[in-house]
Amino acid sequence: MQDCIPTSCSDNGDCYERVGGGAVCLCDVGWGGDSCNEDIVDNCLNNSCENGGNCTDGLNNYTCSCLPQWTGHNCETSQWYKQFVHAFHFQFSISM
Ligand SMILES: [Ca+2]
């Protein structure tokens, strides 16, 4: 009898048949649950969002929702600083 069927572990893990019968899933990193279809790692645990940003858990990743004046993956860049650098580069390039 075959215990592993193609859908046993979704697309996120490999299925192995136990010696005594039954199937067990070995899930890819970040996935868990009986069929490897649950995101089991809270990637917001070390909350890397800076400057008051809100963290949203993703698969082996996270997304920061930044306050209006901040940007970047971890809200580490000031919008004001970005505009300043942009303006500086612009002035520099037209003065050449
Ligand atoms: Ca996650």
Image (cartoon, rainbow, N blue to C red):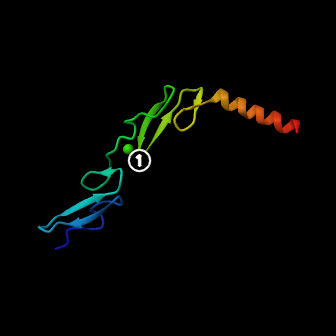
Taking the spot 22% from the left edge, 61% from the top edge, the residue there is 24
The reply to whether the residue tagged 1 has its Cβ within 8 angstroms of ligand 1 is: yes
Taking the spot 33% from the left edge, 51% from the top edge, the residue there is 31
Quadrant assignment for the N terminus: bottom left
Quadrant assignment for the C terminus: top right
The answer to whether residue 68 is above or below residue 30 is above
Point out residue 11 in the picture as x, y percentages from the top left corner: 36, 61
Point out residue 38 in the picture as x, y percentages from the top left corner: 31, 49
Question: How many residues crowd around disc 1 within 10 Å: few (fewer than 14), some, or many (20 or more)?
Answer: some
- From the viewer's side, name the closer residue of 52 and 9: 52
Point out residue 15 in the picture as x, y percentages from the top left corner: 27, 64
* Circle 1 SS class: loop
Is 59 displayed left or right of 6 in the figure?
A: right
Is 34 displayed left or right of 75 in the figure?
A: left
Identity, as a three-letter code, of the amino acid under mark 1:
Asn
Residue under pointer 1 = 60
Taking the spot 76% from the left edge, 32% from the top edge, the residue there is 87
The answer to whether residue 81 is above or below residue 39 is above
**In the image, farthest residue toward the bottom:** 1
Name the quarter showing ligand 1. top left
